[in-house]
Image: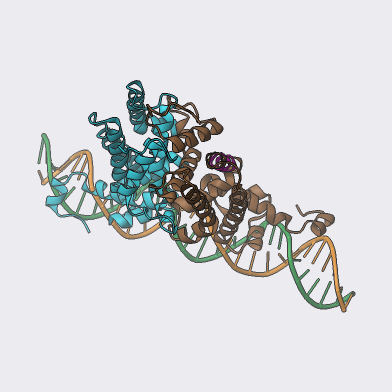
Chain colours: A brown, B cyan, C green, D orange
Amino acid sequence: MSASPAEALSQRGETAERILSAAADLFATRGYEAVSMNEIARHAAVSKANVFHHFNSKHDLYLTVVRRACTHSRERLAGLGSPQGSLAERFNTFAGGMLGDMLDQAQVTRIILRELLLDGEQRGPELAERVFGDNFAALVAVLREGQAQGALRRDLDPAMVATLLIGANVFFFEARDVLRHFRDVSFADKPESYSRMLADILLKGILAAPDNTHRE
Amino acid sequence: MSASPAEALSQRGETAERILSAAADLFATRGYEAVSMNEIARHAAVSKANVFHHFNSKHDLYLTVVRRACTHSRERLAGLGSPQGSLAERFNTFAGGMLGDMLDQAQVTRIILRELLLDGEQRGPELAERVFGDNFAALVAVLREGQAQGALRRDLDPAMVATLLIGANVFFFEARDVLRHFRDVSFADKPESYSRMLADILLKGILAAPDNTHRE
DNA sequence: ATACTGACTGACCGATCGGTCAGTATGCTA
DNA sequence: TAGCATACTGACCGATCGGTCAGTCAGTAT
């Protein structure tokens, strides 16, 4: 089934795009090894040989998919550094925004997490640096500034707080399907509720404060 | 290379044990699809046909590995319900103990997490119920009791606190290799330090408390 | 017309996959 | 001694894997 002459002329790379999209779908849900080039070709409605015409190898195709997901993820994360409002508000906004983005772009998120958390263990440094490094550092900087201004406790590690915030979001994304089956859990399908409680707990802690009855 | 007569008599199932061990190693580090039966047989120093003599199929072998990991994990988790000390102490102990166990039995942990977080998405309920359900519920019960006794804030969801605690440990386990490459992170190789800071933040929060200069 | 290019295909390749099978060695039971 | 079960092996199976190749077709520039 060849494209019409008009298509062949105007839409450059449209086929490659379809292949990339199909590959991203399959890799995200089932991982690298479990997906075959035959399957990708079938999903993209092209011949397998055509896939190899556009990409040198399966690994090359996978790398292209991951690279695209990385740039996509970077662009989204970069928009979260809104420098306005109180620190508590910014904290809240960041947590909720990050989780919302992850859920909206679940496919991309899944690819990134897969690559980051359980694959080669060798590309860790490179990927971490390129995709998350800057944003992690930015979040740490915001927290440090909060410490300098006296809004945050000075006796804690800002990197630890950032890790806790990001980790809570990542874990929610990963474990939703499991959490949904726990009787006590009511927030598995309410990410905004999760984010609100997350920020609340991280900011104020869980201990009862007998002399602190006021609420901010 | 057959075993000596004495071995064949005395050590029942020793070969099957070696196969299970090799399979657990490989499945834990590379996942189901990326590991071949040839490879498992080679690691266990037996013929591939012998692997099929002891296990009906690759999937059967995998299920056996997962099942063992589950019972192992259950037994370990069950030991964490020490009902003594203040709530803060118990909280601290539970967090640190759980993380220490996960790291000590990294292979088992990796298999469980792999199965729970990113595989079938269908076995979620079953596995969650059998492996983590009781312990999650127990942790929630402890937190609820803390609320009833006035030690914990009453305006928060105990399941959320439990999720946060477990999620923080899981994320640390998963993301250590990445965290290690962040300049600001100093705790990637200090799980006890991580646990201490985790409990501290969850208990007291990160906001500065101007009227709360006392430290517990 | 000619020559050339890139997109695309079906047929094919060697390797490896999960799995089977006939056959051997060993020990237990009668 | 015969008979039987279990442990184990090498050789083999069809299917599928990632990847190649010769060739077709459309468009374009000369």
Q: Is residue B100 above or below residue B40?
A: above
Asked whether residue A195 is in view, the answer is yes
Find residue A14 and report its horizontal and vertical position in percent.
73, 55
Residue sitting nearer the eye, B47 or A143: A143
Q: Residue furthest front?
A: B211
Q: Is residue B92 above or below residue A74?
A: above
Find residue A22 and report its horizontal and vertical position in percent.
63, 49
Q: Residue at x 44, y 31 (%)?
A: B160
Find residue B121 and report its horizontal and vertical position in percent.
48, 37
Asked whether residue A33 is in view, the answer is no
Res. B100 image quadrant: top left
Q: Residue furthest top?
A: B148
Res. B102 image quadrant: top left
Find residue B190 and report its horizontal and vertical position in percent.
32, 52
Q: Is residue B116 magenta?
A: no
Q: Is residue A18 above or below residue B99?
A: below
**Magenta segment:** A94-101
Q: Main secondary structure of the magenta part?
A: helix
Q: Is residue A68 above or below residue A186?
A: below
Q: Quadrant of the C terminus of chain B?
A: top left
Q: Is residue A97 magenta?
A: yes
Residue sitting nearer the eye, A71 or D1: A71
Left or right of residue A5: residue A180: left
Residue sitting nearer the eye, B95 or B103: B95
Q: Residue at x 46, y 41 (%)?
A: A168
